[in-house]
Amino acid sequence: MELEKLIRDVPDFPVKGIIFKDITTLIKDAGGFAEALDRFYEMARDKGVTKVAGIEARGFIFGGALAAKLGVGFIPVRKKGKLPAEKISETYDLEYGTDTIEVHKDAFTKGDNVLLHDDLLATGGTMEAACNLIEKTGAEIVQISFLIDLTFLKGKDKLKGYDVRSLIEY
Ligand code: AMP
């Protein structure tokens, strides 16, 4: 199945000049959702993953499903101010200003092998920050997966040294 055919391009969202890659058209297709999940599972099944972490919000969709399929727990990496218990945070630069992501302090234990997932790799800033955040806990990142890699933005350059995978490349 050609998964890219199930991705919808929405021009000028959220701002003029951006072509938004809309994955809702893929996940509403039962066959497409299952096929993408199977491919993520095959990439990860022999990596010794002990936790899957997904980045808010679209990283929760496949991240959660993949964790269940791998038989491990799921950790939400959330935007600032959403998590209720004691947490650790990481701030990173955006084009204008900064953003902060957080996880609960007790989300990972030293020795955890983490698979980090998000829907799309653009500049790589978000994922780089998520890697820094998780490594602060003493956990190790064994794989990073994306549904989509916008390769022309060279986000992978920020993720050197990691096992970075994607199902669809533009
Ligand atoms: P970046 O930190 O630049 O790699 O941006 C990645 C984050 O922004 C991901 O969580 C994506 O969901 C979102 N994102 C960036 N560009 C796009 C795009 N063209 N279409 C859909 N989502 C995007």
Image: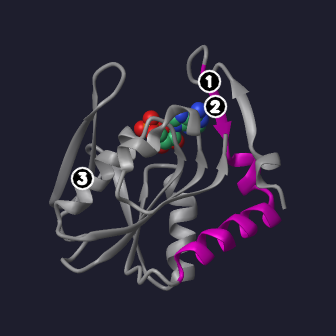
Where residue 164 sits in the image (x, y, percent)? 47, 58
User: Which percent across, then down, holds residue 119?
Assistant: 55, 50
Q: Which residue is mark 2?
A: 20
Mark 2 or 1, nearer chain start: 1
| Residue 35 falls in image quadrant | bottom right
Q: Quadrant of residue 8?
A: top right
Callouts 2 and 1 close, C-beta under 8 Å? yes
32 part of magenta stretch: yes
Colour mode?
A: one colour
Q: Is ligand 1 within 8 Å of the beta carbon of the residue shown at mark 1?
A: no
For numbered disc 2, what is the local secondary structure? strand
Which quadrant holds residue 54? Answer: bottom left
- Which residue position is annotated with label 3? 132
Q: Residue flagged by tag 2: what amino acid is it?
A: Phe
> Up-down: is 12 above or below 75?
above
Three-letter amino acid code at the position of disc 3: Asn
**Secondary structure beneath label 1:** loop
Q: Residue at x 26, y 36 (%)?
A: 92
- Residue on which the image places disc 1: 13
Distance from label 1 to label 3 (Cα)? Answer: 29 Å
> What amino acid type should be assigned to the residue bearing mark 1?
Phe
Q: Which residues are magenta?
A: 18-45
The spot of residue 116 in percent (x, y) is 42, 62
Gap between marks 2 and 3, in whole Å?
Answer: 26 Å
Give the residue displayed 44% in from the left and 63% down from the top.
163
